[in-house]
Amino acid sequence: LAKTTQPISMDSYEGQEVNITCSHNNIATNDYITWYQQFPSQGPRFIIQGYKTKVTNEVASLFIPADRKSSTLSLPRVSLSDTAVYYCLVGDGNNDMRFGAGTRLTVKP
Amino acid sequence: ETGVTQTPRHLVMGMTNKKSLKCEQHLGHNAMYWYKQSAKKPLELMFVYSLEERVENNSVPSRFSPECPNSSHLFLHLHTLQPEDSALYLCASSLGTGSSYNEQFFGPGTRLTVL
């Protein structure tokens, strides 16, 4: 299983861009990178998924360098409601993706 | 709403009780999952069902017994639990288990307290 490493916590202010980096040094060729968001006492919610280069949707962007050993989730202009735990998962979809400790993002006014 | 519902939302039970958690998905998915989330701990994958067949059991104690009668419903039967089993139990579903795009849709969870 590809192991992921993320910062435990991050602080930001409203309106700023937030970048959360995840390390996955032993990512396999067939693995995708998926990010989830979780609010307290709720289930995680899918944010974005990518394999290489850059992926963008209405919520976030995901940057993946050529060696794929890391990835960066970018949240543009965060608001207080973006305060949550963000998880980086790596796997090929065959039940091998595991949630780690995640990054607790706190957005301040 | 994610299309995955869980009942009850809150449950308090004694160690000798028998109870069941229910999960239902309205997304036409073929895979369903049970997760446990204890306070300040990562989500722990407990069980995975694909097309009503259990495909993974992560060394979960036998006091937790899953049941998947069809692809839309998943149960977790609880029996003689311990206080350390108190946690948020989350159900999720996905289109399948063999796809790279295996986005999981989570229910709101059942907050379980074992006295």
Image: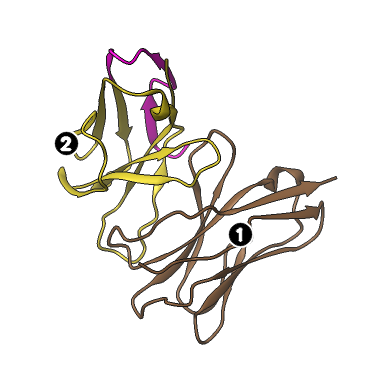
Chain colours: A brown, B yellow
Left or right of B86: which side holds A60? right
Q: Residue at x 79, y 55 (%)?
A: A12
Neighbor class of circle 2 (other Cα within 10 Å; few <14, some 14-19, many 20+) is some
Whether labels 2 and 1 share one chain: no
Mark 1: secondary structure:
loop
The spot of residue A26 in percent (x, y) is 42, 77
Query: Does residue B87 lie above or below A15 as drawn?
Result: above
Residue at mark 2: chain: B
Left or right of B88: which side holds B74? left
Q: Residue at x 44, y 67 (%)?
A: A3
The spot of residue A57 in percent (x, y) is 57, 63
Query: Does residue A100 lie above or below B70 as drawn?
Result: below
Amino acid identity at mark 2: Asn
Residue at mark 1: chain: A
Pick the residue in front: A53 or B83: B83
Mark 2: secondary structure:
strand
- Residue B2 highlighted magenta (yes or no): yes
Residue at the limit of the structure toward the bottom, as seen here: A66
Q: Residue at x 27, y 20 (%)?
A: B80
Amino acid identity at mark 1: Glu
Is any atom of residue A81 visible in this view?
A: yes
Q: Which residues are magenta?
A: B1-19
Residue B39 badge: none
Residue at the limit of the structure toward the right, as seen here: A109
Residue A58 badge: 1
The spot of residue B45 in percent (x, y) is 35, 47
Residue ID for mark 2:
B70
The spot of residue B17 in percent (x, y) is 28, 13
Query: Where is residue B81, by image quadrant?
Result: top left
Query: Does residue A36 lie above or below A39 as drawn?
Result: below
Pick the residue in front: B46 or A60: B46
Pick the residue in front: B58 or B5: B58
